[in-house]
Amino acid sequence: MAMTRRSFLGLIGGVPLAASLASGCGFFEDLVGGDSGDKTVNVAVFLPQGQGANFQAAQAGNILASLQSAANEINDQSLGFQMEVKLTVVPPGPNPNFGAFFGQADNAEPTPTPFSPIADTLNEAAASGQLASGDPLPDLLMISNMNELPLLYSEGIIEPFEQATRVDGSIDLSDFAPGALEAVTWEGQVLVLPLSSSINTLTYDKDLFEIDGVAAPSESWTWTEMIEAGKRLTYANESGSQWGTYAHASVPLLLSMIWSHGGEVFDAQNGTVRLTEPAALKGIELWRDMITFHQIAPNPPAGTFAFMRSNRNGMQVVSFDQLPQRGGGGGGGGGGVQPSATARLATAVRSGGGQGLGAEQIYAAPLPVDARQATWVSPAAGIGVGAQAKDTGLAAQAAVVLSRELSQLPVTFFGYPVYNVSGERIKQVRPSLRIEDANTIANALGYSRGVPPLLGPYLQSLFQQHLMQPILSGETNVADAAQQMSVALLEILRQ
């Protein structure tokens, strides 16, 4: 959940915000803070009590060192405030009972902080005026899992970032990747300053395309052209089997097809789910036909499953004879289940993340188009301004400076930058990438789309349970499955 010790690990992996955010937009000159008199900005590293605390403490030390390095640089610049980094202890808290919604056991028992809602924990701490360690509530909140943004906002723990700046236009939000902003917006408010993200592109195996005499994906590829290429890339012979793409469990692919046909999943303006509209249904139908009619992607039969894996040497689809038994052990894919077949994979819609892209065989390509081009971006880190900060304007200023300093630290990068992005910047933070791949990723951020922060963590399970599996098994048609999925999404939004 948000702002846990694990969230800090994700954040401190490298926060990719260009230095020009702080220097080129008039932020420092125009920002008007309050007149609290106290020019100290507190940044907290959260540390759990209870089981696993020793391990967490060791990791928190690494985070603290990196944050302190950034704070030292900031303090040496004499910007009119001092930044303090502290270890902040928070007690265990209950997990939300989402397990029951998915037909699993009740998981609402208290657990150590990395898995407990930080919003609930801070809310309780606010009631007593301090955290368990005696520290005040922080001025800045580092957030990497965005599903708690609505709760942090509704509980009055964070103040929307735009409000905290106190000056209209002090930050040009149009320079941010559109999907990153969409994914941190709730009830019409940009809640936090997005820092980094993962982004989906069409990845492909260059060697397989060349062997089969298929032209590499291009800027002009449509979904129809991708399907036609997939037909030539899908076969089985004495040397093994090969699929054109991976689709049956690919939510990024399905979302791209819905959006590219002009459809929508959710309307943030009025809070409605729009999966049953004709444009969305057209995208879902083409996704279905890719698997069942054109047969360029695997469709595991009932009682089996298949998943995609990738590494620096290529992509594969690994199939299993039966579903793994919960709690089992053994080989293969868990539960003692052994793989029945491994097939080469020519293309997939996926995030470059920390694997693939930049190796000898796996390359990035733009998403195919129809009515428009769109791909899913998932924010990986953001900075929120504490609603009870001593000076929220000053805290917003400090957030921008901190993001700049963190981006310059020699630490492992986590996600891609979302502000003023270019291929050169992408390659700077991920040197293993080819510049061609970095440019593709930068372009994808420009046509990115986000999903509401409350829905993001549950889309994979919801789509598979209520839409993808029922359609592919023949249990229901596309229109009825879209209706069932709409009901499931609305249930989550009511939580």
Image (cartoon, rainbow, N blue to C red):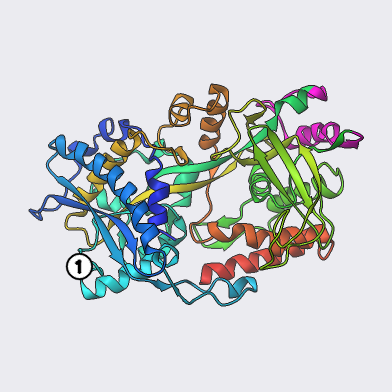
x and y, in percent, of residue 262 in the image? 65, 45
User: If the image is split into quadrants, where does the N terminus sit?
Assistant: bottom left
Q: Is residue 253 above or below residue 151?
A: above
Query: Which residue is the extreme one toward the right?
Result: 238
Quick one: 373 or 432, which is closer to the camera? 432
> Would you say residue 313 sits in the magenta stretch?
no
Report crowding for label 1: few under 14, some 14 to 19, many 20 or more residues within 10 A (C-alpha). Answer: few
- Describe residue 466's horizontal placement relative to residue 297 as left or right: left
The answer to whether residue 482 is visible is no
> Would you say residue 229 sits in the magenta stretch?
yes
Quick one: 57 or 146, which is closer to the camera? 57
Quick one: 259 or 384, which is closer to the camera? 384
x and y, in percent, of residue 253 in the image? 67, 45
Query: Which residue is the extreme one toward the front?
Result: 330
Extent of the magenta region: 211-238
Which residue is at a point 52% across and 43% down the rendered structure image? 198
What residue would you read off at disc 1? 134
Which residue is at a point 34% across and 70% down the rendered structure image? 121
Q: Amino acid at mark 1?
A: Gly
Quick one: 431 or 484, which is closer to the camera? 431
- Describe residue 344's horizontal placement relative to residue 404 as left or right: right
x and y, in percent, of residue 168 in the image? 27, 45
Dot 1 falls on a residue whose secondary structure is loop
Which residue is at a point 55% across and 24% down the rendered structure image? 434
Which residue is at a point 45% across and 41% down the rendered structure image? 414
Q: Is residue 107 above or below residue 60?
A: below
